[in-house]
Amino acid sequence: MSTDYSESIRWPMLITLVLIGFIPAFSGALINPTIPAIQETFSHEPYSETLAQLVSSMSAWIVIVVAPLTGYVLDKYARKPILIGAVIVYGAGTSIAFFLDSIYLILATRVLDGIAVGALMVTVPTLIADYYSGGRRESIMGYYSAVTAAGGAIAAVMGGYIAGTLGWRYIFLVFAGALLFVPPILRFLPEPDVEESARDDGVGRLEAIKKLLRESPVKLVAGIYAIVLVGMLVNNLVMIEVPYYLQSSLTVTDSQTGLVISGVMIGSFVSASMYGRIKQRMRHVTVMALGFVIAAMGFLLFTAADTLPVVIAGVIVSGATGFGIIQPTANDWVASVVPGEVRGRALSGVTMMMYGGFALSPFAPIPLVDAFGRRGMLQTAGYVMLIVGGALLTVWFVSRSTVDSTAKVSSSDD
């Protein structure tokens, strides 16, 4: 059982935890505006366009592999050393790209970026769940997701400005700023007191899996993972497909598209910041259902409208449910139903599914685009979100009815 820090707010610890959310947010958002410039610099290389795009997307694939390994190491050994190591690898390893003249060596640094981000995205929610419980944990999960969303908006603007004024190489120096987190992590974040009954018996991994299967609602955890995969896949369409839709259907300019995408991230920041308050009034399944239904309404709104203000409103509403609602709800939900000593492994599945959705989003819609066009594909995505939201509401209603029936039977027996 971990020590509960919920009774009194330790502001340095809380602020350090939450602000770490800037680190993974900067990973891709800072680089995305520079991809054309990177491609132009290395245009002499075969497949230069693909290589330049990999500078942004390779990290997601690495995270998928690293996340479950991180979860195992967190539960087997300790949390804090993993966090410090990830920050150092991110700050030192990624910033080396500033000095490199080979696109392949730059891609090698992006592997280090993926390793660090994968470790961070699992470790920080695990620490939040270790340190806090109840309503405070829910609020801090929301604040962490809000900082991640805000970091994406800041990074996108910063990346474009630095690339336009100093050159794309200077983007990588920004990553070195992550090293500033090492002193506060050492000073303010204690190592949680989490018991690991199988830590030293030589079969810890097998025992932990058995414990997870025995003491956790496996179907529920697997269902949460599936929800995250679908939610993040569809949500990322806002980032990669909606700009094409806006520019082809409404002749929206590049600058206007950038403002819309920034609005999506601001919307995610607002909804994530409110997660703690929302969760106080609803169960996890209801919050998740609400997120999917709102996202579906946003998709169906902007694909049906022909006026720019309505389209922008629909895009912002649909995109705001990604990091804003899905991420904190999933992390908090999983953390609340699994034993503390396997929490790292369980939460690693959320990160793995999240980045799996990111990685699949450029490819999954292709058949639908070919069959129905981009508008039809986005409308189909909206209906999928609506179906998922409806299914979750059905689960909530059935589970509530079951609980009420059980309570009545118990009362009559008394």
Image (tube, helix red, strand yellow):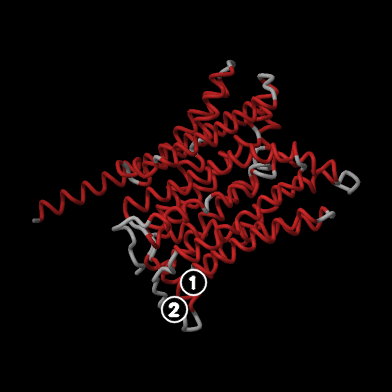
CB atoms at circles 1 and 2 under 8 Å apart? no
The first of marks 1 and 2 along the sequence is 1
Q: Which quarter of the rendering shows the N terminus?
A: bottom left
Q: Label 1: few (<14), some or many (≥20) within 10 Å?
A: some
Name the foreground residue: 144 vs 88: 88
Question: Spatial distance from mark 1 to mark 2, Cα to Cα?
Answer: 14 Å
Which circle marks residue 78 in the picture? 1
Specify the farthest residue to the left: 414
The vertical placement of 275 against 84, above or below, is above
Disc number placed over residue 256 in the picture, else none: none
- Identified by mark 2, the residue type is Ala
Residue drawn at x 79%, y 56% is 99
According to the picture, the residue beneath numbered tag 2 turns out to be 198
Q: Is 374 above or below relative to 308?
A: below
Residue 157: image quadrant is top right
- Please, which residue is most extreme toward the bottom here? 201
Q: Percent position (x, y) of residue 57?
A: 69, 48
Q: Residue at x 64, y 63 (%)?
A: 89
